[in-house]
Amino acid sequence: MKQFDRRKFLKLSARCLGATVLFGGAGLLIFRSRKDCLYQINPESCVACDKCETACILHPSAVKCVNDFSTCGYCHYCYAYFIDGLSENPENLVCPTGALKRKQVGEFQFEHTIEERLCTGCGKCVKRCSDFGNSSLRLEIRRNLCKECNRCAIEKACPSKAVQQIQIPT
Amino acid sequence: MEEHFSGQPKKGRSPADSIEKDQQSTPQSQPDFADYQFPEQNTPLFKPFWLRMLDIIALLILISMGTWFVLRCKRRWSIYILLFTGLIYLGFFRHGCICPIGAVCNISLALTHPDKVILGISTVLFFFIPLIFAFGFGRVFCGAVCPLGAVQEFMSFRAILLPRSLDRFLRIFKYIFLILAILSATLYMEFLVCRFDPFITLFRCSGSRNMWIFTVICLLISIFIARPYCRFFCPYGVLLGIFSKISFRNRQIETDLCTKCDLCRQSCPMNCIKPPHIDTFSCISCGKCLHICPQNAIK
């Protein structure tokens, strides 16, 4: 009889301890948790290395280059497009895949758009634009491609801690 | 109302406070020629709030139905339907992330470094809901919901029964993996569980060559050994097992009805039955023994 009661007592105390840990832990963490956050690249901290292209668990990466048209200079000689001179020779173009496209919209104004399908997120054009241009080109994690991992691999690889968590707007 | 997120390339503004409603409202340096229209800026939208909560709701529905099926309704196909739904939604549709197994790393990181990572409410709920159900009814998450378990279950065509000593030896790796996962998350901020997730390449349809090789190896092993990841490697399974052991309602064999025919032991994918005793730590409440027992001795 005594042994039976002891086992029941042990099981009861184990259940009490388990319940405390479970509900206490859940309550504590729910209290400390925030709304879901997603990762995004902060354009000020970004140094346009090529880690976004290689570190993402997706191949091709979920990071694409985006042009902010309100800041873009619409330059005839776009430094992010041409390496040296106005030759359209593929060896003279900054973009290795030809994703950065150029269209004349005025006498000396050229509209620069990125074909997302071709962009690999290497950041070469972003670096040139921020070094010599208006910094209108930036790298961005595309929400329709990002798989929202528990732990962003790009964030881990980023040398300048530019990948940060932002709260989702509602 | 459309909401766009766009990081400002200007100095002094961070992505968090630059949520532009309309890209074309106040352009800073508009080209000074007439009738030019800015091209449409294609910014993909965040998923709406209700769609995010849909994951939690789906988890709750699947796990509740799994509990109900194993407690009350004893049809063969019911649990398989739930597993299949869990596989399609949590696995392929949501690309296998968020999962409670990976949440082990998230939670241990959040407990030790609260400043380094923002813990979302979905992660906390995904971690605790299966544990709460395990505390009440046993490991119903494993048997009815888990997409990784579903892949292994649907791949086990020629499952063989392992000798008991080998089984017991291999089970030790679960505990080692759990300790390593917690340590790597707290010390190195590395998510070991996600790195060694065997079927994530299937869910994402993308991965490096090594990961695909790992997936194929795990699929091949699953054909011959039932639920190898669940039995020998799942770190979350350790936590679920602890709460399952002290649960209120769990699978058990009624000793006076049992004829020791051994059918349940041979049908158990987790190899946890030694008639008339079921090891509730490992039992995933899949219901196979319930269906196969000729005496209906298992509750």
Image: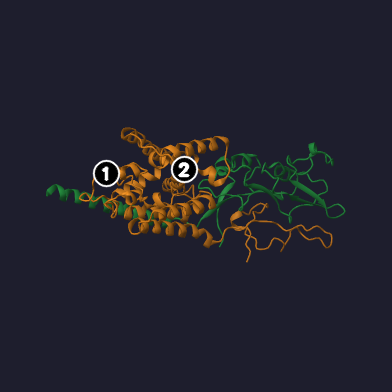
Chain colours: A green, B orange
Question: How far apart in space, not on screen, are marks 2 and 1 (Cα)?
Answer: 27 Å
Q: Secondary structure at mark 1?
A: loop
Q: Amino acid at mark 1?
A: Cys
Q: A2 or B219, which is in the foreground?
A: B219
Residue B255: image x %, image y %?
A: 21, 49
Q: Which mark is residue B261?
A: 1
Viewport quadrant of the C terminus of chain B: bottom left
**Mark toward the start of the polypeptide (2 vs 1):** 2
Q: Is residue B226 visible?
A: yes
SS at mark 2? helix
Question: Is mark 2 in CB contact (under 8 Å) with mark 1?
Answer: no
Q: Position of residue A49 (x, y in %)?
A: 65, 40
Q: Is residue B119 visible?
A: no
Query: Does residue A53 appear left or right of residue B286 in this picture?
Result: right
Crowdedness near tag 2: few (<14), some (14–19) or many (≥20) residues, C-alpha within 10 Å: some
The numbered mark at residue B144 is none
Q: Which tag is nearer the camera, tag 2 or tag 1?
A: 1
Left or right of residue B259: residue B289: right
Could you say which is closer to the camera, residue B244 or residue B21? B244
Across and down, in percent, residue B226 comes to 40, 41
B240 lies above or below B47: above
Three-letter code, disc 2: Met
Q: Residue at x 23, y 53 (%)?
A: A12
Q: Label 1 marks which chain's residue?
A: B
Q: What chain does badge 2 belong to? A: B
Label 2, on which residue? B155
